[in-house]
Amino acid sequence: MGDHKNQPLPARLRYAWHGLGHGLRTEASLRLQALCFAAALAALVWLRPGALWWALMLLASGAVLAAELLNTAIEQLADALHPHHSAAIRAAKDCAAAGVLLAVLGALGVAAAFAVHLLRAHGAAFSLYDS
């Protein structure tokens, strides 16, 4: 176990990629969230908003994916260490799931603000032609 500590950066990056791959293989919710991230990225490329919108969307998406990966890690660790029913383990898992929920709600808030921004920008463009 100690062989993973203080490794060179390339080794640590490999561990991180393995963790991401494991999460994508085993967690349907992470696959869905990754698909939503890809759709958001495609929308950003297509719509070409300003740098602030890129930053907000990437941070919100990254927060959702990170929260889901942490939730997965907590669930798997808890199940491995304590496979029997436990109120404390259930509470820890529920709190981790709540963290994912809050990250998703935050990302949806950013998406809604982006949609309002686009509607207002297009509305202003249309009003120029109406006068």
Image (tube, helix red, strand yellow):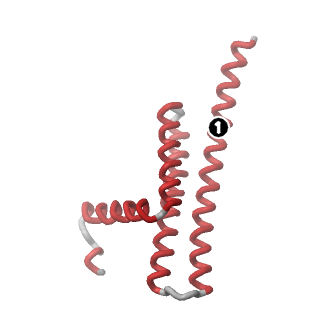
Secondary structure under the numbered disc 1 in the rendered image:
helix
Mark 1 Cα shell of 10 Å, populated few (<14), some (14-19), many (≥20): few
Question: Residue 37: where, in percent of width, then height?
Answer: 50, 48
Q: Residue at x 69, y 23 (%)?
A: 124
Q: Residue at x 58, y 87 (%)?
A: 86
Report the front residue among 32 and 98. Answer: 32
Question: Residue 128: where, in percent of width, then height?
Answer: 70, 15
* Tally of numbered discs: 1
Quadrant of residue 89 in the image?
A: bottom right
Q: Residue at x 50, y 75 (%)?
A: 75
* Amino acid type, residue under disc 1 in the picture: Ala
Quadrant of residue 119 in the image?
A: top right
Q: In what quadrant of the picture does the C terminus appear? A: top right
State left or right for residue 24 relative to residue 8.
right
Task: Determine which residue is flagged by label 1.
Answer: 115
Quadrant of residue 5 in the image?
A: bottom left
State left or right for residue 76 relative to residue 11.
right
- Name of the residue lying farthest toward the right: 131
In this rendering, the answer to whether 56 lies above or below 74 is above
Report the front residue among 94 and 5. Answer: 94
Question: Residue 102: where, in percent of width, then height?
Answer: 63, 61
Q: In what quadrant of the picture does the N terminus appear? A: bottom left
Q: Residue at x 41, y 62 (%)?
A: 25
State left or right for residue 112 relative to residue 9.
right
